[in-house]
Image (spheres, rainbow, N blue to C red):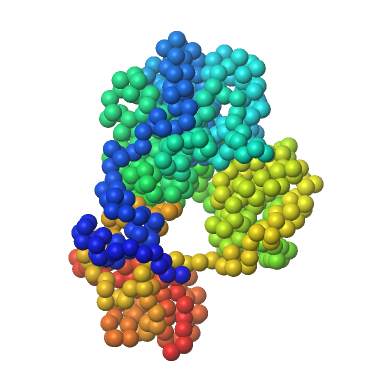
Amino acid sequence: MVHAKKADFKAIGAAFGISPITARIIRNRDVVGMDAVYQYLNGTTEDLYEPMLLPDMGRALEILQSKIETGKKIRIVGDYDIDGICSTYLLYQALRRVGANVDYEIPDRVKDGYGINESIIRAAAADGIDTILTCDNGIAAIDQANLACDLGMTMVVTDHHEIRQDEAGKDLLPRAAAVVNPKRRESPYPFPEICGGMVAYKVVQALYRIFGVPKAEWLDLMEFAALATVGDVMKLQDENRIVVKEGLRRMGQTKNLGLRKLFEKNNLDPSHLTAYHIGFVIGPCLNASGRLETAKQALALLLSEDEEEADRLAGKLKELNDTRKTMTAKSVEEACALAEGQYGEDWVFVIYLPDCHESLAGIVAGRLRERYHKPAIVLTKGEESIKGSGRSIETYHMFESLTEVSDLLLKFGGHPMAAGLSLEEGKIDELRQKLNENAKKKLTEDDFIEKLWIDVAMPFEYISEPLIQELSLLEPFGQGNEKPQFAQKHLKIYRARVAGKNRNVVMLTLITESGFSMEARWFGDGDGFIEEKGNCQFIDIIYYPEINEYNGRRTLQVILRQYRFVDP
């Protein structure tokens, strides 16, 4: 599919000193109007939205200020993924900075499950905690909030997850003293698509104002809001884009010892970090602690001020992530065998893997979704019930779909694209049946055809070094601000050979119909590419242009993202 969004690309290009091609790409990212384009290209931290626009922010601040000034014991309750870890870090550092009597708790993924539970509430009461402050969870904690109130504790919820509604369409909120969530129906916050770490970061900003902490200290914490935003796969649009762009820059010279050690263990150059490195290298290491052991290890790394301890913890997280990769590969293989063997006709995969580590269910569901372009829920055997995690496609709202079958579930929550759930083992087949019945009422087979979006069908002749350098203005790339994709058809394959130690690079020379040649690279199964090619001499490609620097020479090349061999 080629984006066909309309705008005066020449005028936009002239106004901002960019090419019409770059202007078109920006419009393709749903950036509309000159003001929005200006912010997209030049937005700064001054353009971030006012924290007080978040619902209940004023009430939350009044409570926290009072508790801090009277020395009441505050406990932060976070979550075990990167968003929850960063949220907890942000609030813990900030509350300590302003003199709060504060500690933290992060649920154990296997023992406690997602979010705050009754045992955490009771433990807080037994420890003499006055106030519970949640982050990246709590919006669905109806019973838990009631218990906290009954035990005489104050509860403040900060969260970003979807909110269930009653039959009248009103938000079902926990009985907390304040509920700070941009997804609330009456929220005036201009951009609700922020993560739990960003909500926590907004609380920190407002709290620092009250206690007179210099703005520079708040800005120093921005890298953790950026980590959370990328790690939780939020859209890199609007203020998320500003925070990630600025956060990545600050990570390059981070003062955080734990982060520096984690970059070192993964052989990353801090001065050249991208959102990819956060999403696929650093994020998985932080998540691995919560998946296989305890997320408190990741938080301890971020809080560490001891060189030896930070080095040990960073090494441990790297090892855990390597173990997680091996375990994931085995579970993905099992899930694909079931998907193809037993459930190939299903529109929504519900795959039960009793022996899969429950922390890997979401990753395995994501791999199923990628491979088959269908919504996928992977269920595992928990200690007390069946637990699962789902990943969806754009046309299927996972959270709403689970709401429709909530009578079969013990617990659930999430987003349009992802969700977590638990249920009794005897209801797995009924869940599969109901979800598929409902999907076939709302969707068509076309909804399951993966669409590859192309920004511009651009001939090689348009590629230049200035254009490639200009495309860097669009970074950081990620969810909602994808790396641009270009396409060209019917290219003659003049040369193709396999290279690389693992034979995972194909080096090609491609020639257009006008005789213009371009070097190209494909990263993947090199021998499989050559075998698939056979005697075919022509190819259609989706690509991204790059500058190749080698032995002091700079040459243009294209990186193949997708390809299709075609007849002459």
Position of residue 201 in the picture relative to residue 362 (left or right): left
- Total marks shown come to 0
Viewer-proximal residue among 164 and 340: 164
Viewer-proximal residue among 338 and 57: 57
Residue 341 is drawn in which quadrant? bottom right
Residue drawn at point x = 45 percent, y = 11 percent: 71
Give how far across and how far down residue 500 sits, in percent: 39, 68
Residue 538 is drawn in which quadrant? bottom left
Residue placed furthest toward the front? 168
Give how far across and how far down residue 100 sits, in percent: 42, 17
Residue drawn at point x = 55 percent, y = 18 percent: 154
> Relative to 13, is 390 above or below?
above
Can residue 346 be seen at all in this image of the molecule? Answer: yes
Residue drawn at point x = 22 percent, y = 56 percent: 16
Position of residue 392 in the picture relative to residue 59 (left or right): right
> Relative to 496, is 180 above or below?
above
Can residue 227 be seen at all in this image of the molecule? Answer: no
Viewer-proximal residue among 306 and 354: 354
Q: Quadrant of the C terminus?
A: bottom left
Residue 143 is drawn in which quadrant? top right
> Relative to 484, is 130 above or below?
above
Residue drawn at point x = 55 percent, y = 51 percent: 417
Residue placed furthest toward the right? 426
Give how far across and how far down residue 106 sits, in percent: 54, 30
